[in-house]
Amino acid sequence: MENNRKQSAFAPPPESDEVHFYDYLLVVLRRKRAVFAVFGTVFLGVALYTVTARPIYEANATLNVRDGKGNVTLLSELTGNSGTSIAAEIEILKSRTIAREVVEYLHLNRRMDKVSKGLAVKVDELAVEPELIDNGFTVEVTGEKRYRVKSADGEVLGEGREGELFVAHGVTLLLRELRGQSGDSFRLALVSSLRAAEALRGGIRVNEVGNRTGIIRISYSSHDPEVARDIVNALSQTYLLQTVVFKTEEARKTLEFIEGQLDSVRTALEGAEQNVESYKVDSGVVELGADATRIIAKISDIEKERTLLQLRRRQIDSAIAGMQREARAGDYYVPVAVMEDPAVAALMNQLLGLEAKKRELLTEFTDSYPLVEGIALQIVQVRRELTQTLQLSQSELQRQDKSLTALLNGYDTELRRLPQAERELARLSRLSKVNADIYTILLTKREEARIARAATISNVFVIDEAIRPEQPIKPNRQKNLLLGFVVGLMLGVGVAFFLDYLDDTIRDSDTASRLLGWPVLAVIPYIAPRSTASREGKAPLAAQGEETRRTLISHLEPKSAPAEAFRALRTSLHFARVGREKQVLLVTSALPGEGKSTISANIAATIAQTGVKVLLVGCDLRKPTLHLMFDHPRTPGLSEVLIGDAKLAEALHPTRIAHLDCIVAGTTPPNPAELLNSQQMAQVMSEVRGRYDVIILDAPPLLAVTDASVLTAYGDALLVVIAAGYVPIKAARRMRELLLQGEVTVSGLVLNDRSAKGFEYYGYGGDGYGYGDSYSELADNAALPRRLWRRLQRLRGPNRY
């Protein structure tokens, strides 16, 4: 019980929260295969994409949009047009109308594919009936400069010749060039211009360079550099023509309106003048007094203001109607004539921005996507606010019109106070004066409109036309490879730490000692299946049997790193012994497969090399392996001795190692635990204690069966084998609880690298650990990572083990 109390007092020390860079490096090195796998997959994937991806070229053009007042200054008072905003110009550039013009100009709605190799063809004209839109047909070469047209179903539509117009079954085709072998073919289709325009709009990028510079950049990307250039230039030219057409049309409509008004005003003026002259003759009143003349002048000015107000109200009515009409059609409308109103301009710019954002989102999402629905609701709200703003402006104009009408009524009251004869002349003179002033204004505006229509120029100027791009913008090889390298490395390291986080096993001696509370006496490096000695033919014992016998490395390769580790373990066990009372050493582990039999055999061989008589007893009756290591027959063994089928002397097998005898496990009995706990086992242990200096019991795993717990009664000391990266922490804690319940003293732990995953991490490097020439040869042949690792260990300080 005293030993038990001592073990209980050896409690695990508190865990340290301090983490060093060394610990992070350990994780990466321990999971280096995962790091390399992830890194290689990502980097090779990026590299493969970069090499195989079709290059994308981008063409650019820059335009200068100037204030639109320049060539229609004289009309600004009449039309209310003071120029459009840059946001409006950008939306016009990206409009369906402009895109459709470009599609038709460059024939982007033509689709030619499945062209036979070596076939050269140029289509000069292509038209189909509306019902044949999007339905392709095949053109097959039948001879020199001759071809046959087939429908999608294979029906022959007719035959044609290069340079001659082909018209049949709703298809009109003119091939300017046709060079190929008989049987060559290609597929040709004419898609909807509207659909082609929408596809084109998705690739057009228009933005203002800087802030309020008036400089617009147009960009388009394509796999064909010439197509990218042609589309950008066509967009620029079409936009220029549209601005000229728009301004010309605006001047034409203004001129028509003025000329229409001139006829009616001229007729009214002529009638008013005749009435004035007739009244003067009939009444004898030749001229008006000063008061009447003043009143008529005031009335004339007010009538002119009312005329301009009415025109302005008509423009606002037209803008409201246009917005409502386009909203129902699902398009946007720019009320150019009322854009000088700051409130209207601000709302219009906001609306155009929302329309652009919605169009951009629709290239990736559907109308039901939440973000698209949110933008659509904002568009409805802004349109409602814009309509309300225009209606408020209309109300303000109505209020002003009422004020002017009130002023007119006041002056009419003053006129009625004049004498009858003078009052009638004043009324007639007023009509004549007002019509004359309006007629003069209209004549002036008509001349201005004529000049504007004849001299209309665009307020947009091309700064730089698009040129053929020489270098693709995608893929960027250097950027992609660098990004693939960085992302692959980061993902690899991340996966390594994630796997390490999921790994709940004991991986190093610090964790084992801290968790279990016992010292780590040695760390055994990985024992390779084929050692240096066996490769060089220096190990007859290893060459005779199977791979299992090669694990007796302390005898086969005494200068190897594992052999040196076993000698260090022998020394640790020697200092742990006090006299002869710790004669029997029990070697066990928590789980099967941790290498306890290999450790037992090598400890026995190492101790025997000092001249001490050693007996190795195979107590793992369920899965014995010692007979394979020493090339002994499986029977007779310990189980035969315990059941009485053989005597102890018959089961004692001398080995090729001096001073080392072995009792193998024998045949697996049906009741191993009962045999090991029998009186016969006690007699065997009593007898061998008198014959040998050291007895090593190769016990079964503690957690797998109860056999090892039974054997603790015979052991003076216990050595626990822990396989690095194999034993879960919960299993190790359960093993500790079982051992603390027994009477045996736990000498310490042996950390075994059974999987070759961590031998660099336990302080050993290379295939040998010899001295003199052997050490020099090892140093020359050591891999660079291992030498680097040793340096890191020296920088960190003394070996943690």
Image (tube, rainbow, N blue to C red):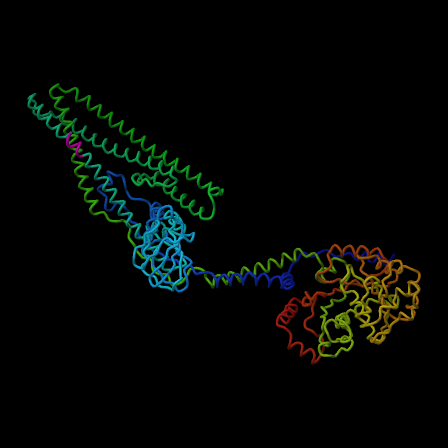
Quadrant where the C terminus is found in the figure:
bottom right
Residue at left offset 86%, top offset 63%? 715
Q: Nearer the viewer, residue 214 or 473?
A: 473
Give the percent coordinates (x, y) of residue 595.
76, 65
Q: Nearer the viewer, residue 531 or 346?
A: 531
| Rendered position, 506 above or below 795 | above
Count every numbered label the image shows and give the total.
Answer: 0
The residue positioned farthest toward the bottom in the image shown: 773
Give the percent coordinates (x, y) of residue 243.
28, 47
Per the image, is 513 magenta? no
Per the image, is 266 magenta? yes
Give the percent coordinates (x, y) of residue 764.
69, 70
Query: Residue 282: which quarter of the image?
Result: top left
Query: Residue 270: which quarter of the image?
Result: top left
534 relative to 419 in the view: left or right: right
Quadrant where the N terminus is found in the figure:
bottom right
Instruction: Please identify the dominant SS of the magenta region.
Output: helix
Give the percent coordinates (x, y) of residue 756.
69, 66
The boundaries of the magenta stretch are 262-267
Q: Nearer the viewer, residue 509 or 643?
A: 643
Q: Is residue 164 visible?
A: yes
Q: Is residue 215 visible?
A: no
24 relative to 304 in the view: left or right: right
